[in-house]
Image (spheres, rainbow, N blue to C red):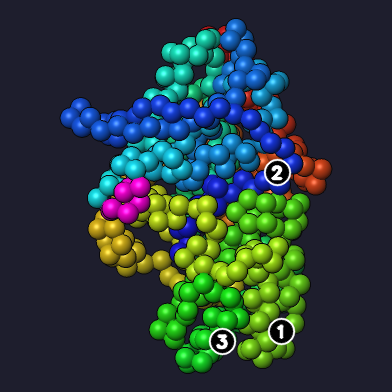
Amino acid sequence: MLNKYMLLLSIFILFNFCEAYEYKEHYFKQKVDHFSYISNDTFQQRYLVNLKYYDARNGSIFFYTGNEGDITTFANNTGFMWENAKAFKAGLIFAEHRYYGKSLPYGKQCSKNVEKLGYLSSEQALADFASLMFHIRETLTGARNAPVIAMGGSYGGMLASWIRMKYPHLFHGAIASSAPIWQGLTPCEKFSEIVTDNFKREGKSCANSIKSSWAAIRKIGNTITGARFLTDTFKLCQTVHPRNISMLVDFLSDTWNFLAMTNYPYPTNFLKTLPAFPIRVSCQYLQHQSLNDTELVQNIFKAASVFHNYTGNSKCNDLNSPGGPTLGEKLWDYQTCTEIVQPMCQTGTTDMFEPHPWEPTSFSEDCWHKFKVKPDFSINYIMYGGKNISASSNIIFSNGKLDPWYAGGVLKSISKSLIAIFIDDAAHHLDLRPSNPADPVSVKDARQLMLQWISKWICDFRRQ
């Protein structure tokens, strides 16, 4: 279940819709398999363009490397690009990731037929982005001489860093925000520990209540009557039974992780409508530990509803879509079963979750059961170097201290041009969101540092 979190992943540049961004929708014919000279299959890749501030004589290009979702989501939520386009005379390109949104090889079959998923990979997506950028260089006036800065958050940030590594002649710098490119190379328990620390910040009783809730839920759900009580209490779209009570446990685990990633200092509205500091709001229901199991479960529902139904408009909670309907969870699940393997575990002692060890064998078997594929645990190193990336340059890795994904991020600068920025008081790629009066000083400072490096990269490019 934890692998789903890259979906917010990514997709978690939550936006309060204070401004409407304008762009034109375009499509570019891509090869389904960039690395074969035999297959002639193609598909239409969607990309969004805004050239309001683009200067064909002395401009630049900001290129968003799309995540695992509809590209309009990211175009509407990456305020950092829009707010700084004028200063850099930048054209804005938002490229949609294959198999998501409207960029569908084999149409809707690609999400229903496992055999059609074989070309869903970061390697193919990067080739899409590179081909699209080459097309833009050839067709947009002045683009051949324009420096290109890739940007992305979460999985999109991973792609931004990797595209600079793999295609440095087309992308001259990269902002990789909340990009856990080393998630598979760090202790598996760190993610859950950071989530727990976020809840402890609002009082130990909050985290302790969540920790106590697992036994209470399983005890109540052990009977048909109790399971029906849980179904009704949590207003579930599906009915839980004693045999599948783990679905509710996983759903709630996901909820607390999503809240940690979206714990922004002001109200947001993207995957869900959330208040400022949603963990704080949730924890107000979990301050009393001397409750019986029924009372505790009822309070857990109230706390979880801050994420799932803050407006009160939701009719039921879908156990199969804890992050909201915009997430391509099955498709992302496939990616985590092949190349984007992100080992995670829970100890039950250093975190507030049920114990859940990382078991590569069972994980692999589960992937085979779902997709008839098995993960390649070494592909990250083979394709992208693992932690041996010092040969690359012009990449900023920014991570927030409140973001559980920082566990797999680059937290220390590797060289003079591989820069790490660690941001206090920042949740999942808050630095790429639109600026807001409630932004902490650490985020404002990080953005200024990012702009300084972008200026340097552009100047260096023009001096070549």
Closest to the camera, between mark 1 and mark 2, is 2
Q: Is residue 112 magenta?
A: yes
Q: Earlier in the sequence, mark 1 or mark 2?
A: 2
- Does the magenta stretch mainly form a helix, a strand or a loop? helix
Q: Disc 3 vs disc 2: Cβ atoms closer than 8 Å?
A: no
Q: Which mark is residue 289?
A: 1
Q: Which residues are magenta?
A: 108-114
Which residue is more in the foreground, 183 or 271?
A: 271
Which residue is more in the foreground, 369 or 407?
A: 369
Q: Position of residue 1 (x, y in %)?
A: 45, 64
Q: Is residue 34 magenta?
A: no
Q: Which residue is mark 2?
A: 17
Q: Which residue is mark 3?
A: 229
Residue at position x 50%, y 62% from top?
A: 321
Q: Which amino acid does the dot numbered 2 rest on?
A: Phe
Q: Earlier in the sequence, mark 1 or mark 3?
A: 3
**Residue 165's quadrant in the figure?**
top left
SS label for mark 1: loop
Q: Which amino acid does the dot numbered 1 rest on?
A: Gln
